[in-house]
Structures are given as C-alpha cells and as structure tokens.
Amino acid sequence: MSTWHGDLHKKKPSGGRKRAYRGKRKFEQGSFPVETIVGEPKRKISRGRGGNLKVKILSDKYACVTDPKSGKTEKVEIIRVVKNPTNIDYDRRGVITKSAVIETSLGLARVTSRPGQNGIVNAILIGEEEKS
C-alpha cells in the first residue's frame, strides 16, 4: 500500500465534506520516504510519471564535499551522521537527509542534496562554530 496524494478526502472551501465521485488514480499515487543511511552503496531506481527515472539512495558511504573557500569538490568517505535537524528520530538512527551534518575525513559538512530524491550525497564544508 503506497501513499496517496489525491484531494478527495479534503473539505470544500465552505467547510463541507467532498463526496468521492471516483476511486484512486495512478497519477495520485505517491511513495514512501527513502531513509538513506551510512553503509555499503545501495541504490533503487523507481519509475516516475512520464517514464522519468528517479534514483533513490538506500545507503551510501561516500559524499561529494565542496570546500567553499577553495571551490574544490572531492569524493570522500562519510564517517558518521553528527546531527539531523529534520527529525529527532533520524538524528538517533543516523539517517542522511538534506541539511544533515555529516562527519567526513575533510571535517564536518552539511548535506545540500536530497539523497532519497536526487541519487547523490552532495555536501558543503562547515566550520566548527556552525555545528550547533
């Protein structure tokens, strides 16, 4: 059972309820969130609307980290997830989402991509003062 993004369950602007005049449609179907963790690289390819392919990262141990001062980008290994402000539970479980702070061999970095949607972990180096 996947998620459903239809609006038949919502109320009318007047506050009354909408009566379902049809069933669910394929184009209203969503998908469950992919919770990317640190581990052996594992990807899943899903077909989207219009035949578009979406690469979802289930787990990965590398990130493309950019140094804003020099402008250079390197592929480095992720050591651990330091902090994830998205969700306290993600913080505890070490899930990588956008804006998560990860520890790499270059230092602390903030994730700027959406691994479950984009299929890559991009990050930018941050200073120690920005950690909290």
Image (spheres, helix red, strand yellow):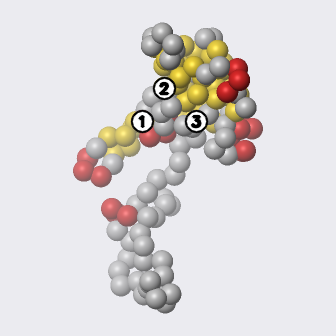
Up-down relation of residue 114 to residue 20 (above or below): above
On screen, residue 40 versus residue 14, left or right, reads right
Distance from Cα at disc 3 to Cα at disc 2: 10 Å
Q: Residue at x 35, y 80 (%)?
A: 22
Residue beneath disc 2:
122
Q: Tell me the amino acid under the disc marked 3.
A: Ser
SS of the residue under disc 1? helix
Determine crowd level at label 2: few under 14, some 14-19, many 20+ residues with C-alpha closer than 10 A. Answer: many
Distance from Cα at disc 2 to Cα at disc 1: 10 Å
Are discs 3 and 2 less than 8 Å apart at CB?
Answer: no
Residue beneath disc 3:
99
Q: Position of residue 102 (x, y in %)?
A: 64, 25
SS of the residue under disc 3? loop
Whether residue 123 is visible, yes or no, is yes
SS of the residue under disc 2? strand
Q: Position of residue 25 (x, y in %)?
A: 34, 68
Sequence-earlier tag: 3 or 2: 3
Picture disc at residue 33: none
